[in-house]
Amino acid sequence: PPPPDMPKCLKDTPYTRLCSSKSILTVNGQFPGPTLYVTEGDTLVVDVVNQARENVTIHWHGVKQPRYPWSDGPEYITQCPIQPGTRFSQKIVLSDEIGTLWWHAHSDWSRATVYGALVVYPKKRNDYPFPKPHAEIPIILGEWWKSDIQAVLDEFIQSGGDPNVSDAFLVNGQPGDLYPCSRPDTFRVTVDYGKRYLFRMINAVMNNIMFFRIANHNITVVGSDGAYTKPFTSDYIAISPGQTIDFLLEANQRPSQYYMASRVYVIAGSAGNTTTTAIIQYSGNYSAPSSPLRPALPAFDDTLASTNFTRRLRSLASKDHPVDVPQNANTIMFFTLSINTVGGSIGGRLRASINNITFVPPRIAILQAYYNRIRGVYGDDFPSNPPFTFNYTQQTMLPREWLTPQNGTEVRVLEYNSTVELVFQGTNLVSGIDHPMHLHGYSFYVVGSGFGNFDRDRDPLNYNLVDPPLQNTIAVPVNGWTAIRFKANNPGVWLLHCHFERHVSWGMEMAFIVKNGKSPDAKMLPPPPDMPRC
Ligand code: C2O
Ligand code: CU
């Protein structure tokens, strides 16, 4: 592994994919960006140097940053952007995260090209709670637009509708050989027969949950979102944007070449041009078929395939890796996740909301305003329940006020150490869809989920309080609900948002302020001297 303290230089770099070139924002000229290797509990210092023409911030997705939200990264939430020609030294504080996390830009749509893996090793190297792998292989799913990403964003905002679909999906920055003019750009990995490999998979795509499968091979899932899971075997994966899945592959099939393939899960429309491929080739001499075997992926609209995979995730819940799920909650919230339209007319410009509030980013970072007691930047009235109760998932008659969101820059304040239960309820306003919800500053236990309307009397009786998975991103099923629990023991300002980039642009985000505790080690640390200025 490289030394833990390294500069990261953002610059505009020419890249060619699908026989077409453009300049993209990169870190150190690399796409995807460099993989960072750290050890459990490390503090990493990264000097972010902006030599590009655009503003940027860097977020450490899944790193809790205890008491130190200053380096978390989301633009106008914890910091103002790092402007061209300036720098910001970020201190990334790891605690109990282990396995695979990642980092990405967190300003407008710049994460389309600015992302990379963050691998967290156990204190004793190779001290895994699963059989030791021969080697590790990062797999980052991404997306490529032939157009400039800022142009894609501008056009999307102008149109008021959905963004243009990307021209290719990518495995480790490569589109694979099924797209026009992409054959040379295929990621290949060589394996030895009889050996075991640990794949560290990250979904960095902008707007889609992805299916993934390797021809002829089953995989064993052993981790997700920087935590170990109970091992389970599957022939495919469903992974949300923001989420990570660690899995073992036994190279135990006839030596040959095999495709691994990934494509979108979408509940409506078509999968179109979305199958990206990479190739696993066994070492040694054999006669391989001219074209590797292709795996049969779940149908692009297979909601059950997506949700069933996610529901199989469980915490390891072992002596060395115990669960710490709050058995009761003293702060209970219910958040509806909706797609809305301006003016309440179907066909109008699209918006998105949580509890009917479309988030409007402030001009000064909320964290800076909170810490320095600057008034008028945000309100603390974010509701813990939606303003209207209705049949969220069946609604066909749509009163205007349900369709039209309110704009707001509102936070919800949480007492230090409160035990929080948050139920996300998908709604069928305008259109029902899954939402991969991500919380900064925390991992949370996913204690329950289901289709239809959440039932406060019945559904909590079926919560899993024994071995629920510990996640930082969870796909709330289409027209369904997901319940999470966490202890609010990390003071700071922490963003909650859908990890579909178009939904964020439409306003599906809010922030929590978690207050300081009483003891000195329960208080936020002071900001570094070089916080970017607004
Ligand atoms: Cu991976 Cu706020 O994001
Ligand atoms: Cu969403």
Image: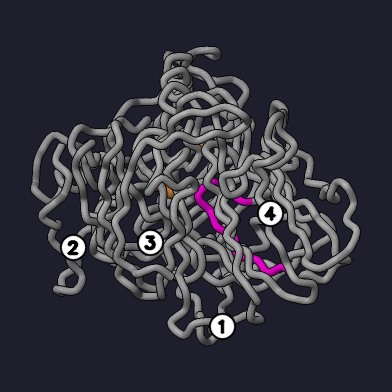
Q: Nearer the viewer, mark 4 or mark 1?
A: 4
The structure residue drawn at horizontal position 58% and vertical position 49%, both measured from the top left corner, is 172
Question: Residue 261 location in percent, x, y?
Answer: 73, 47
Camera-near label (3 vs 4) is 4
In the rendered structure, find residue 125 and report the number of the disc placed on it. Answer: none
The stretch of residues the image draws in magenta is 239-249
Give x and y (percent) for residue 44.
31, 66
Earlier sequence position, callout 1 versus callout 2: 1
Residue 196 in sight here: yes
How far apart, in angstroms, are the residues tagged by discs 2 and 3?
Answer: 16 Å
Query: Does any portion of residue 475 appear in the rendered image?
Result: no
Asked whether 355 falls inside the magenta stretch, the response is no
Contact between labelled residues 2 and 4, with CB atoms less than 8 Å apart: no
Classify mark 2: helix, strand or loop.
loop
Screen quadrant of the N terminus = bottom left
* Residue at which label 3 appears: 63
State yes or no: discs 1 and 2 in contact (Cβ < 8 Å). no
Mark 3 or 4, nearer chain start: 3
Q: CA distance from mark 1 to mark 2?
A: 31 Å
Q: Which residue is mark 2?
A: 524
- Where is 247 relative to 364, above or below? below
The numbered disc on residue 188 is 4
As measured in the structure, the alpha-carbon distance from the residue carrying label 3 to the one carrying label 1 is 22 Å
Q: Say which amino acid is labelled 2.
A: Met
Q: Is residue 246 magenta?
A: yes
Mark 4–mark 2 Cα distance, whole angstroms, equals: 45 Å
For the residues labelled 4 and 1, the Cα–Cα distance comes to 36 Å
